[in-house]
Amino acid sequence: MSPYTRDEAWAIARSLSPRDTIRVAARAASGEVLNDYHRLVPLDGPAPSTTWAMLLAGDDQLFRYLCFDFDTSQGNAARDALRMAYWLDELNIPHLTCISGPSGGRHVWVRLSAPADAAAVRDLADYAHSILPTLDTKPLQNAAAGCVRPPYAPHRESGFSDPQGDLGLISSHEAPADTVKQLTALLIDLGAELPATETELPKGAITDAAGNPKIMGVKRRLSMAMEDTLRGPAGPDASHTLSRVLIAAANARWSYDDIVEAVATGAAGLEHARTRRVGDKRVKRTPASTAKVLRNIWNYAVRFVATHPLNATGDDPEYRERIADVTTVVQQALAAADAVPGLWAARNPRVGGTRSQRAVLDALCLYMLQSSRHIVEADVRRLSADTGYGRTTVSDALRALCGTWITRVAEAEGVHAARYALAERFSPGEEGTSRTQARMRAEHKPTLPLQQNLIHEIGTRLELLRHDVFTAPHSLGRTSGLIFQHLPEDGTLSTAELMKETGIDADLLRRRLRRLHASGLIERIRGGWRRYSPGTRDLIAKRLGVDGYLEERRKRYELERAVWAWWQAEVVWMERRFKKRKGAKAIFVGNDRPDFVAYPRGPSKRGDHRRARELVLDGILDRELVLAA
């Protein structure tokens, strides 16, 4: 039973709240108190008859409180709350833990001495959720409406939010101004990662039978120096050493299973995968934590190796400066694109921007960040897979972007696609090398929050739009996808705000909103519109009969890539001097081609491309060659 009356608990909320209003739970006609806090009431009025939740940010949308809300329906909330409280103690950050109600959930409160930026708090929530699975990130990801029941507030079923310490820890004590920055840095050091969105693997990278990425080719031994690093002590920076070893292993064509085996056999250089640093000591990780750390860094290492050709020493001394330059240039380009939303929504043929052009620009920026290079190789089929637009539309978009937004550095040649850079107006200077996609420095630690945040932001934006329900014939269409992309899952946008964000005219916007609402992808609540979970798109696509459209196109493009790579290998063989000749060549007769068998020929001895497609579908080519084409 609470030591305070309802009116006294209301007075506590009034003294803590950063705003003059608070959210109050609704009551059903049956009298049941609902888990619905849409109604705002002033705090200077009487205590409501239901319960209430305090907003974490002020009217300026800057956070005055952090509240980590751990939900028992997602696992062991008490354990996760204890872990968060321990880390806050390590940083000397005052905090208060409350048992939220009868289900045993936990709220860990921190009062900030200086307002915190909403974007930084949102990233903090994502980092925390990656290692604390019971954390509900919604209150920390919505500066406008994110709220949590304050200490002593009644629970809608029974009981109250019960503080497990002195209320003065948040009423009289404030956390340092750099709390969000400190806590984010600690979580990254503990292995936290922003959720990644999937994009097409770079050329040269494939997936193995288990679905893990690897570099195409035959496994070879590590160099003597890197073998010593693998077997020797991890040193004071075990994470740094693990990154070096995994990048070298990816370059030597190892697989993820090879790395897992090396960890299991006790390779000392992989210590960061087995233990984590806590103060001056290292504590053993759980199997799940080990797998998470290994998979994250391995995925990064494979993409890194696929896009960065090493020099003779295996070093890249300009990497740190280059990644800062690339990130700055991409930020400038994205800011310039965001400043003209109406350009990308234009339908007038006299206006040079379209939604497809913006999606292609975003994808090129993503490739630059992933490869840490100003110049990237990008073929229309890869861009199609990552944007959801067809190859013809992508090709048109690339031509339209050239000059104002991007520069074509080199034309496509053979199996190599055209190379692109951002326009000179965004560039800080000349690229240090003429290579297209460089291979990452083995000594560099792959934890760069700004770069990672941009990759996450762009990847999420592309993924929300890249779906059958918006791209297939007879689907909801691209305009609906653009609206869905801009709507928050937590929080709302009004119709006027959507017009400003998307550049879509009012009449068309209202029609598309009505269609999205009728389809069940978005909802209208007090304050505006918000989207449902992205997973809802799959259900709507099936209902519309358009599911599987992008997958079918991906398979078709994969077939075309494989046939093209096979033909290019045949051309190289035909131009080779002193090649072996054994009379009439049959497809399955041995020859001196190291990878591809002889290309099928028709009666005129010309390449039979139709037969080649049939043979690829029948599996004549090695799976790795098909995936890497």
Image (cartoon, grey):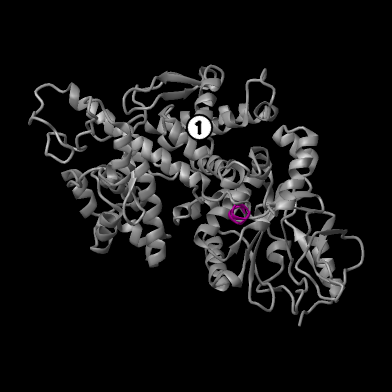
The quadrant the C terminus occupies is top left
Which residue is at 62% across, 26% downward? 336
**Picture layout, residue 467 above or below residue 69:** above
Going by the numbered disc 1, the residue's amino acid type is Cys
For the question of whether residue 440 can be seen, the reply is no
For the question of whether residue 137 can be seen, the reply is yes
Secondary structure mostly taken by the magenta-highlighted segment of the chain: helix
Using residue 286 as the reference point, say whether residue 585 is left or right of it: left
Q: Secondary structure at mark 1?
A: helix
Is residue 470 rendered magenta in the image? no
| Residue to which mark 1 is pinned | 365
Q: Position of residue 143 (x, y in %)?
A: 71, 50
Q: Quadrant of residue 525?
A: bottom right
**Picture layout, residue 133 above or below residue 486:** below
Using residue 586 as the reference point, say whether residue 173 is left or right of it: right
- Crowd band around label 1 with a 10 angstrom C-alpha radius: few (<14), some (14–19), many (20+): many
* Span colored in magenta: 537-543
The quadrant the N terminus occupies is bottom right
Which residue is at 36% across, 55% downward? 294
User: Please, which residue is most extreme toward the right here?
Assistant: 45
**Picture layout, residue 602 above or below residue 24:** above
Q: Position of residue 129 (x, y in %)?
A: 55, 59
352 or 607: nearer the eye? Answer: 607
Which residue is at 18% across, 38% downward? 587
Q: Quadrant of residue 48?
A: bottom right
* Total number of numbered discs in the rendering: 1
